[in-house]
Image (cartoon, rainbow, N blue to C red):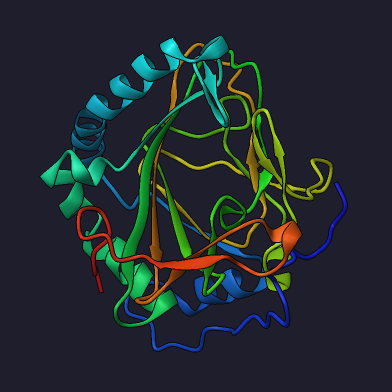
Amino acid sequence: MERRAHPWNQDFVWEDHTGPFSTISTAQAKAYDDVGFFVIDRAFDAAELERLDRELQAGDEMAREFLHSAPDGRFTVAGLDTQIIAPHAVQRSPWVREFCAHPVLAGIAADLLGPGARLYWDQSVYKQPHGAEPVLFHQDNGYAYVEPQSYVTCWIALTDATPDNGCIVVMPGVHREGTLAHRHTDIGEECWGDWGTAVDVPVAAGSIVVFTSLTPHATYVNTTDAVRKAYIVQYAPEGAEVLLGDPTKGQPARRVTQNDPGRQFAVA
């Protein structure tokens, strides 16, 4: 796919982070600015991961039941033969709601977004054994166009994530161009990316891959016998808006402020 700007992405300028930082290091902030991601190794222990996995099971089961009724067992990027995606665990579990305001996660959000950072989205992604498809290169801001364009994704590994079971793969540095044009496919949105030059980001269970919503990333097929489990939490600045409309037909038709009290709340 051609590497070009999203039609609504005009005059974007990336702003580097200067601190002071409460949770991340200066080196991690520089990596975020320069290549679009960094890793916090083993931020959560085995007991926290076990509890988180247990709290996420209800959503995973509901999503699996829905996919059983869907054509070919698939719905866009989710599928019984690819990955089970269950959004909004914070609406089902008070424990998960508190987890999304964990000092480490809230500190990352505050350091990268400033005071007033809010939970924007959360979802579990359980990549199925011997999957049929990878997740294509995309930016998180390519699924729903948010302004400001850069928000923060914390990709939490509940199990070890490796190239064999579907770890994150990123295109470093591209985030500084802002949101790229995406196209719709049967297995999700896709933007420009290059598997040959992309960087693998394998991590141990409990680690966090922190990246901006503008970092093009993908995940490999899970070729192993076990489920690869991840929980994704995203934070946006106060007042962030989702732009709605057809970008091929001009400017957005409307803007929706992201302040749903049931699932979007201040953490910093």
The residue at the far right in this view is 2
246 over 62 or under it: above or below: below
User: Which of these two is toward me, 241 or 229?
Assistant: 241
Q: Is residue 229 left or right of residue 213?
A: left
76 over 43 or under it: above or below: above
Residue 23 visible to an observer of this rendering: no
Residue at the spot 36% in from the left edge and 24% down from the top edge: 63
Residue at the spot 56% in from the left edge and 25% down from the top edge: 165
Total number of numbered discs in the rendering: 0
Q: Is residue 170 left or right of residue 16?
A: right
138 over 106 or under it: above or below: above
Residue 192 visible to an observer of this rendering: yes
Q: Is residue 248 left or right of residue 64?
A: right
Q: Quadrant of residue 237?
A: bottom left
Q: Give x and y (percent) for residue 1.
A: 85, 46
User: Which of these two is toward me, 79 or 163?
Assistant: 79
Q: Give x and y (percent) for residue 133.
A: 66, 22
Q: Give x and y (percent) for residue 139.
A: 63, 54
User: Which of these two is toward me, 265 or 201?
Assistant: 265
13 over 159 or under it: above or below: below
User: Which of these two is toward me, 215 or 147?
Assistant: 147
Residue at the spot 79% in from the left edge and 41% down from the top edge: 195
Q: Give x and y (percent) for residue 206.
A: 35, 43
Quarter occupied by the C terminus: bottom left
The residue at the far left in this view is 94
